[in-house]
Amino acid sequence: MCSYFEQYLRKHSLNPFPGSGHLPAEDIRRRIRPTQPAWTLDAQGPSERRWSMLPPWAKEPKLKYPTFNARAETVSEKPVFRHAWKHAQRCLIPASAFFEWPLLEGAKIRHAIRRDDAAPLYLAGLWEIWRGPEQTIESCTILTVDAREDLRWVHARMPRLLNPEELDVWLHAEPEAAAELLSLPYTGALVAAPDADPSPLGSAQ
């Protein structure tokens, strides 16, 4: 599961305006929550999308159940995600960290999970476009897998983090090749520690 994450565009070298040298005011977005906007990278470049998948067949721009995560084991089968998967609408969702709340000594303590070298994480995602009579919504979801053994104390699930050599495959390969990645482990060194940021739970900056 992943329900909060953070993006730091400058650290990710992610410029949504290539050639301009300009970065949006929200260079750092903390505590990104489901349905809020997040920067993604697809085969065509960076794009801002709502974090919660909205399939093209939805009658309204909001579903009654959560779609911000997609289980990697069933992503090709679930109606909400099936169209995006079939049409190779895959993206990378860069993150400085993602957050979980393990239960420790009777209390839930917010933990940030990061790379130990502070390099950006790249979360495997899917994107979709919903077109309504008055608006068009681009959305995305994060794929999740069983947590690595060293992180199971934090949560039973985690985002499918992509290794550097897997990024191009995820963006450009056929669905069959991309599916093979989902069963492979993320090999980067991760550290989970209590989050020192004083901002309140649920805030987004």
Image (cartoon, rainbow, N blue to C red):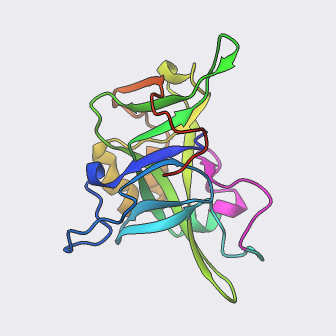
Q: Residue 57: horizontal and vertical position, in percent?
A: 72, 75
Q: Is residue 92 visible?
A: yes
Q: Main secondary structure of the magenta part?
A: loop
As rendered, which of 135 and 178 lies closer to the eye?
A: 135
Residue 94 vs residue 62: left or right?
A: left
* Quadrant (top left, top right, bottom left, bottom right) of the N terminus: top right
Q: Which residues are magenta?
A: 61-81
As rendered, which of 22 and 53 lies closer to the eye?
A: 22
Q: Residue at x 39, y 65 (%)?
A: 42
As rendered, which of 60 and 92 lies closer to the eye?
A: 60
Q: Residue at x 33, y 55 (%)?
A: 9
Q: Residue 108: horizontal and vertical position, in percent?
A: 65, 23
Q: Residue 194: horizontal and vertical position, in percent?
A: 49, 23
Q: Is residue 88 visible?
A: no
Tell me the quarter of the picture where residue 152 sits.
top right
Q: Is residue 127 above or below residue 165?
A: below
